[in-house]
């Protein structure tokens, strides 16, 4: 959960997650949709899918016990070299180097290592440096934790506390007066933008949702049906309402790591009971359940905006209907 996400944001998710899945066996036995429900809002959903797949492999291949060595750990879904080394160091005291974002910054500054830390050449040099620094005999959990905490609390990305740093006397970046020059800034790339039309179909206190493909953006979550064109959306609307009256809502913009997405919602108030849903990935979700459903953050935010209005219209009573109610 802490990959790409700050501690403050993670804590409530972590507590709920561990309450529902107290051990690897319960996580492995759970349906993926339950895992995604508890992850919804954290983003980077491949992490949740990998975590679930990892738990299942631990149960199937290792009888429910995590392997102890970093090499085997790194072959499990979602566990890279640095994470595997950290697990091995903390759990078994293994003498393994780690290289998370904080450690990269500490090493780049201390040894004045130039270059983009994400580039293959610079990363290889950082790994070699991290390995060369491993103490011959030490408390590896304490050493590993101390190195990470140094980057997280002292050698921070901005306004580093050099005066409080225990390595200040030997830091090459500080000696040259160029602490801010390391790590080298990444070259800015133009972020492509995409747009998609989404159908916001409402009926009797329910909203029509579609489960997305297992991989890709919002993989495995339920979202509003999405289309590449307004014409495609209108054709789909005719399958829900014989005479659809669509209303345009303000665009919603959402930034991903590698692109920005503009959602163009079209609202459809279905006036009569809709026809049968023939696709298994479609469902009518009670608006009263949007807080616990596995929804992407932008979709949940949009539904929360309209939910009070629908409740005022009397639709909330329909929330008593089963979540899995289908028009069929």
Image (cartoon, rainbow, N blue to C red):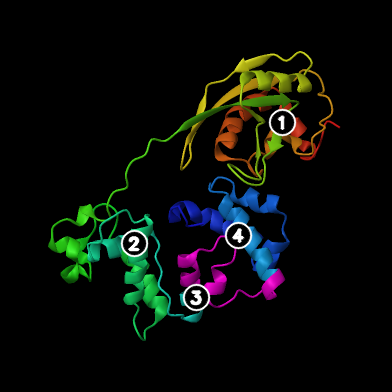
State the separation of the CA atoms marked 4 and 3. Answer: 17 Å
Kindly report which numbered mark, 4 or 2, lies closer to the viewer in this rendering: 2
Residue 312 picture location, percent across and down: 66, 24
Mark 4 vs mark 3: which is more N-terminal?
A: 4
Tag 2's secondary structure? Answer: helix
How crowded pointer 3 is (Cα within 10 Å; few <14, some 14-19, many 20+) is rated as: many
Q: With respect to residue 251, does 285 lie above or below? A: below
State the separation of the CA atoms marked 4 and 1. Answer: 29 Å
Kindly report which numbered mark, 1 or 3, lies closer to the viewer in this rendering: 3
How crowded pointer 1 is (Cα within 10 Å; few <14, some 14-19, many 20+) is rated as: many
Q: Which residue is mark 3?
A: 88
The residue depicted at 56 percent of the width and 59 percent of the height is 15
* Residue stretch rendered in magenta on the structure: 60-87
Q: Which residue is mark 4?
A: 51
Q: Is residue 73 magenta?
A: yes
Kindly report which numbered mark, 2 or 1, lies closer to the viewer in this rendering: 2
């Amino acid at each position: 959960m802490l990959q790409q996400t700050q501690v403050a944001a993670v804590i409530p998710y972590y507590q709920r997650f561990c309450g529902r899945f107290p051990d690897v066996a319960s996580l492995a036995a759970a349906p993926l949709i339950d895992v995604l429900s508890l992850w919804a809002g954290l983003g980077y959903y491949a992490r949740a899918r990998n975590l679930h797949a990892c738990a299942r492999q631990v149960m199937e291949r290792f009888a429910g016990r995590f392997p102890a060595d970093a090499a085997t750990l790194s072959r499990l879904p979602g566990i890279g070299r640095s994470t595997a080394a950290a697990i091995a160091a903390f759990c078994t005291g293994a003498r393994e180097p780690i290289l998370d974002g904080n450690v990269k910054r500490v090493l780049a500054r201390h040894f004045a290592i130039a270059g983009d830390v994400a580039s293959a050449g610079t990363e290889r040099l950082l790994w070699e440096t991290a390995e060369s620094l491993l103490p011959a005999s030490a408390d590896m959990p304490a050493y590993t934790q101390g190195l990470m905490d140094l980057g997280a609390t002292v050698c921070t990305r901005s306004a580093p506390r050099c005066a409080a740093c225990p390595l200040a006397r030997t830091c090459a970046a500080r000696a040259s007066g160029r602490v801010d020059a390391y790590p080298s800034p990444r070259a800015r790339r133009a972020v492509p933008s995409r747009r998609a039309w989404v159908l916001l179909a409402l009926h009797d206190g329910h909203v029509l949702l579609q489960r997305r493909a297992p991989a890709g953006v919002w993989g495995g979550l339920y979202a509003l049906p999405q289309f590449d064109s307004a014409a495609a959306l209108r054709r789909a609307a005719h399958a829900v309402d014989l005479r659809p009256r669509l209303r345009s809502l303000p665009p919603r913009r959402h930034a991903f790591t590698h692109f920005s997405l503009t959602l163009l919602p079209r609202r459809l108030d279905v006036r009569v009971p809709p026809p049968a849903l023939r696709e298994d990935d479609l469902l009518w979700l009670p608006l009263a359940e949007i807080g616990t459903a596995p929804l992407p953050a932008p979709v949940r935010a949009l539904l929360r905006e309209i939910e009070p209005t629908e409740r005022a219209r009397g639709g909330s009573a329909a929330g008593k209907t089963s979540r899995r109610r289908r028009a069929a």
